[in-house]
Image (tube, rainbow, N blue to C red):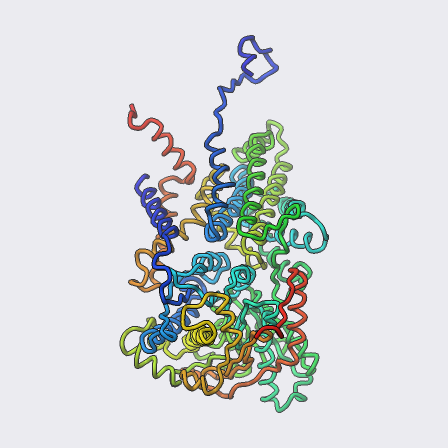
Amino acid sequence: MQTPFKRSFAAALAGLATAAAPQAQAGSNEQFFPLATYRVGAYASSGIPVWAGMIDYLRYINDVEGGINGVKLVWQECETEWTAEKGIECYERFKKGLNGAPVAIYHPNGAPAAYALSDKAAADKIPLITLGYGRTEATDGGVFPYNFPAMLTFYSEASVVINYIAQREGGFEKLKGKKIATVYHDSAYGRETQGTLDLLAKKYGFENIQIPVADPGNEQSAQWRQVRQAKPDWVFLRTWGVSTPVAIKTAARFGFPADRIIGDIWASSNEDVLPAGEAGKGYLALTPYPGGAGFDIHKRIKQHILDKGKSDLKDPKSFGSVYYNSGLINAAIAVEAIRAGQKKFGNRPLNGDEGRWGLEHLNIDDARLKEIGFGGLMQKLKLSCSDHEGGGAARVQQWDGAKWNLITDWVQADRKTLRPLIDAKAAAYAKEKGIKPRDCAKEA
Amino acid sequence: MSASIHRLPAPFDHAPIEIVGRRQPWGLLALLGVAFVLLPLLGGDYWLNAILIPFLVLSLAGLGLNLLTGYTGQTSVGSAGFMAVGAFATYGFLLRVPGLPLPLALVAGGLFAAAVGFVVGIPSSRIKGFYLMVTTLAAQFFLEWVFVKFPWFYNHASSGTISAPRLELFGQPLGSAEGRYLLTLGTVLVLTWVAVNLVRSQIGRNWMAIRDMDTAAAVIGIPVERYRRLAFAVSAFYLGIAGALWAFAYLGTASAGSFDINRSFQILFIIIIGGMGSIAGSFIGAAFISLLPIFLSHGGQLVFGGSLDAGQVQNLQKVIFGVLIIVFLIREPEGLVRLLGNLRARLAVWPLRF
């Protein structure tokens, strides 16, 4: 009886020792990149390539470019299992930095954690990048100074889908009377587009059908039976993790054509369609980070990281997969933001507030995209105090059974139409919480 | 009592029990001193936010379930549902009743959860064992569905998420880590004190009589059905307050997804591992379930950090955690509290065992 107890006690002591270990080597010339990962649990298959992409890019910056203007990057992982409570634990563990290397930007990597950290990060002045998820109303940086739903929020995503459907149908006037069903993961993430689709349905006169899938969604006969009864023209699939391949397979079983299903950005990866097998052929998905290993950055990473055996990828087939590329882009935005911040604060590691400044003055134009090797892979991105989203475009890709083929250029969201929704939500949030919004005109 | 030793007690007035010099609870007082004074001063954000607050809230939830399962013998897998009721009700009260002080809102949320618990407990007068457990399972899914389906509960927020209103007590803001920790600790302390007294009172003894043998309890005149429903209500009251604390003092936000069936199982495991029918067991079980993975994670980072594939390390931690649970339960099916009790009994006679 005593041995296992002693062992666990020893483990506890070891943990205590690490938790309480003094932060040695203060003042080092290093920037800390905390990695809140999910390598176990239902969503691990989506996560693993993301971390590989992030780590490979950080390694590339370190080994090939000598860091960001000489500031080396260090990183450490912490497992969140895509839950809020572990996400908080990781954030609290990391927020003070690592051995004196400060945190400039934090990726919560997971919607529950992003919501839970929103207030905590604002109190600690650490900016959160939630690329393709998180609170949409955080686009209003006046109310949410430390939340950056960069590149593509869920509102914009819904608008991109409708714009793309209009393209296919031959104009917005053709949308009238069409039925567009949204099959969504019943969570904060899944419900986020409802308001937008309502608004757009009123504007263009299509019928908006909402069908929820309860988490984790590994049985969806009821939902697709509902789809079959409603006979929609298009299905917007907003599932995530295991629920995506199940949806595609179930759709095939109920005779709904895959090329009429448009997956959202969390249902648009190789890991989502591969388990669906034959049923996935023709499936459409929109993505702000298209799949493919032919972009310039991939050649560089292949040469310097992959071929030298330094990659974090366990399965080389994932190189250039959608999630791998999303990891690259996530890391690139953070790196570029730190570069932007260094222009003001000097070539040194930045703290969270300086990281926020960098993000709000981030301007990645086409020339810069080409320079860093992300041309075609990433849209141009310009953030500011009043606009924490920036881009708002996505490309549509189609699965041919073996790989994704890009079938459109960047489809831009109608962000002007959506902005009043965002402003109203942000104002309501500010009122509920008693926040006095910053005046963005004064932010230089 | 000591005066009565010198004369013969009236034959039927008192039960023939003699309380032998009550021990002073110095240990307990010292623990409270550390918890209330030292930890907030020295703890820092990481300890308070990430370790102590969730541990305390889970302990409270475990305690609530222990009253129902450990003391009354009715297994429930609907704990998280009651937590959700408490969280959403407290949020609703704070939002819709302006000027309502936080403790009252917490109590109101708890009472609301108790009412729901009472309703869910009605079938307990007819069925028991596994069948009763299935009704609590139904309650769990039903309640989760309710808080997704009706936007009124989360004030029509786009994402179905409620977020903590400003926490304050008598004009003092409680938003800081220390404030939220002290709020949680204070609540847990009061409720634990109530629970300790409750299980020693007639109610508690009736519950235990029902747990041990309901027929015999009925024969000696205990209204079994009423006490069973009461157990459901009291348990749900505790769980409701735990849910509100989980949402507002710990996460700062909550949606129905924060109170899914996995949370119910987590709480059930807390009392199974900690010890059924033991107040201290709830705390020990919560410590095991919530702290050990964190220590393992730190340990894993320390031992393997960088040298081994991160995914393998994560999976290895899960394996170790699972193995530890199995080992503990094989060694002592009555839970960690019994294990510690045995250890203490051995240490008391050590080294002169004979």
Q: Position of residue B9 (x, y in %)?
A: 58, 11
Locate residue A98: give its quadrant: bottom left
User: As displayed, is residue B21 above or below residue B282?
Assistant: above
Q: Which of A257 and A36 is in front in this view?
A: A36
| Picture quarter with the N terminus of chain A | top left
Residue at 41% in and 36% down: B338
Which residue is drawn at the image coordinates 49% and 20% (left, top)?
B21
Residue B332, by quadrant, is: top left
Q: How many marks?
A: 0
Q: Is residue A5 left or right of residue B245?
A: left
- Point 46% across, 32% down: residue: B27
Q: In this orientation, which residue lies closer to the viewer: A72 or B28?
A: A72
- Give whichever of A179, A136 is nearer the camera: A136
Give residue A55's position: percent from left, percent from top.
37, 71
Q: Which residue lies furthest to the bottom in this view?
A: A170
- The quadrant of the picture occupied by the C terminus of chain A is bottom right
- Asked whether residue A405 appears in the rendered view, the answer is no
Please state the horizontal and vertical placement of residue B191, each as a whole percent of the image: 58, 39
Is B60 situated above or below A334? above
Relative to A197, B346 lies left or right: left
- In the rendered image, residue A119, in percent from the top left (x then y), is placed at 56, 60
Residue B47 seen in this snapshot: yes
User: Which residue occupies the extreme left position in the image?
Assistant: A308
Q: Which residue is drawn at 63% across and 58% down?
A: B147
Using the image as rendered, state which of residue A160 and residue A184 is in the foreground.
A160
